[in-house]
Image (cartoon, grey):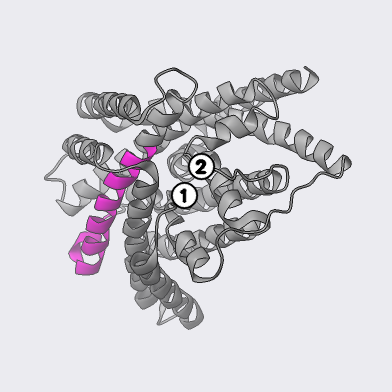
Amino acid sequence: MILDIVIVATLVAAAAVLLAPNLRRWPVWRAMVTPLASIIGSGFLILGPLLHHAYGVWAPLVMAGLCLVAWGFGGAIRDNIAFLGDSGSGGQDHWSESLASAVLGFAYMISVAYYLNLLGSFALSLTPFDTPYFARLLTSAVYLVIGAVGWTLGFKMLESMEYGSVTVKLAIIAALLVALGVYFAQTAADGRLVLDAPRETGLAAITLAFGLIVTVQGFETSRYLGRNYDAQTRIRSMRMAQIVATVIYLIYIVLVAYSFTASTGPLSETAIVHMMGQVSPILPFLLVAAALAAQFSAAVADTNGSGGLVSELSRKRIPQRQAYALTVAVGLGITWAANAFEIIAYASRAFAAYYCLQASIAAVRVWPTHKTRACVYAGLAVLGALMVIFGRSFE
């Protein structure tokens, strides 16, 4: 009972801070909302049980590795933002930038399908309609809502919808971390900390990690917000978004990995809901709400990014609103053709291809003045290529 009160109090306090007018008016925070929404759109929901199930005691180390690789790719993209300047355009004059943007457009279409399919699964996880068929029906309905709003009202309305959902999500994450912290402390005091052996080892463990890069993806959306924010604001906000997301991920994974025994049965995308029921009876309901907010905000963030890059590639001939309709059409097809874990792997490969290209471009651009950094980017480009080739889905 006391823990439930602490959870609610944390939720209210975090929401009050996030809704403060001064924070909402801060340009860097406004620019940070889009990449942050995408980065932690699903990771904190699905990564905890998945990494714990696959890697056991080593789950936090794998999470740190994913975040480190994402930071490296983010550095390459930040250098490319600085090169392109305040407009965020000009890359279409170079075949490499055009190719990277085209690959990212495809990746966004898959990732939006990933986010919204998780939304459908979580929304029905505590109801009698918890089946793949009804989850896909709900996913399709949300797709149509986002497409309609994007087509009729455009970026500003989508951004406003996104801010509200991000606020809900971050407030619930704060409450979740506090509850997990208390549970972890009690478990440690009782001498019951869990040190599960990994189920995935060797090459299989590496290729599975390659297939999870999409769960820390999202920072690249800053690259395509040049119409709304200057280059320095986008660079700073992307860096801050990655730092905040990394801190959230690492704390969360540590608390989950050493507090719970991994399930011996099949792992579902909604496993976190039932796991958190052991901590507090109200957490499953809060997590479902967080899932709806997280997946919606992440889907909107990537829809915005998709619209921006398609407009850039077409030299403004294709409005962003028409790009939203294309994203919806492709996503509906993916929704009815694949399951959540398959979509994660497909999206990871697509984003790895994009990061490979961006790291390659950055390596060439910084070579004349920063040779060591150029070598790091070249290594990341090779890593991205390996992820495309060998990344696999969780089974």
Q: Is residue 25 magenta?
A: no
Specify the segment rendered in magenta. Answer: 89-115
Q: Which of the pair 345/72 is nearer the observer?
A: 345
Q: How many marks?
A: 2
Helix, strand or loop under label 2: helix
User: Residue, x 38% and y 31% (percent of image)?
Assistant: 159
Type of the residue with mark 1: Thr
- Residue placed furthest toward the front: 265
Tell me the residue that label 2 is attached to.
46
Type of the residue with mark 2: Ile
Nearer to us of marks 2 and 1 is 2
User: Residue, x 83% and y 43% (percent of image)?
Assistant: 188
Note whether residue 80 is visible: yes
List x then y, in percent, for residue 103.
25, 58
Q: Main secondary structure of the magenta part?
A: helix
| Image quadrant occupied by the N terminus | top right
Residue 215 — which label? Answer: 1
List x then y, in percent, for residue 242.
53, 51
Q: Distance from label 2 to label 1 (Cα)?
A: 9 Å
Q: Which of the pair 3/395 is nearer the observer?
A: 395
List x then y, in percent, for residue 365.
36, 74
27 displayed left or right of 305: right
Note whether residue 28 is visible: no
User: Residue, x 44% and y 71% (percent of image)?
Assistant: 380
